[in-house]
Image (cartoon, grey):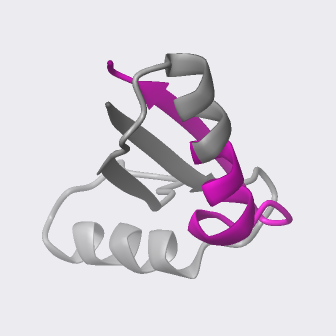
Amino acid sequence: MKAKVHIRLKQGVLDPQGKAIEGALSGLGFDGVDNVRQGKFIELEINESDPAKARTQIEAMCQKLLANPVMENYDIEVLG
């Protein structure tokens, strides 16, 4: 079963990478770009046929390794 995990910093957490991207875009002439936030996107395949069980396993992966739940939010999309 395939899944996608989108991870991003929680609102209010400073994002120095986002600020660096914002500055670089401005330096390249892309004016009017504000509040850039950078995140992570992870695709994975899991050997599980039950979508609910797959989601539970991926949730555990996010809590233990893929995301920092104190600073980051994440969304899981199980594709089947």
Q: Nearer the viewer, residue 47 or 64?
A: 47
Q: Residue 62 lies in magenta, yes or no?
A: yes
Q: Please, is residue 74 above or below residue 10 in the view?
A: above
Q: Nearer the viewer, residue 4 or 58?
A: 58
On-image quarter of the N terminus:
top left
Q: Is residue 67 left or right of residue 77?
A: right
Q: Residue 64 lies in magenta, yes or no?
A: yes
- At 32% from the left and 18% from the top, the residue drawn is 80
Q: Nearer the viewer, residue 53 or 30?
A: 53
Residue 71: horizontal and vertical position, in percent?
78, 65
- Is any atom of residue 9 visible in this view? no
- At 50% from the left and 19% from the top, the residue drawn is 51
Q: Please, is residue 19 above or below residue 73 in the view?
A: below
Q: Is residue 14 left or right of residue 29?
A: right
- At 20% from the left and 57% from the top, the residue drawn is 30
**Magenta range:** 58-80
- Is any atom of residue 56 visible in this view? yes
Residue 49: horizontal and vertical position, in percent?
40, 23
Q: Nearer the viewer, residue 10 or 14?
A: 10
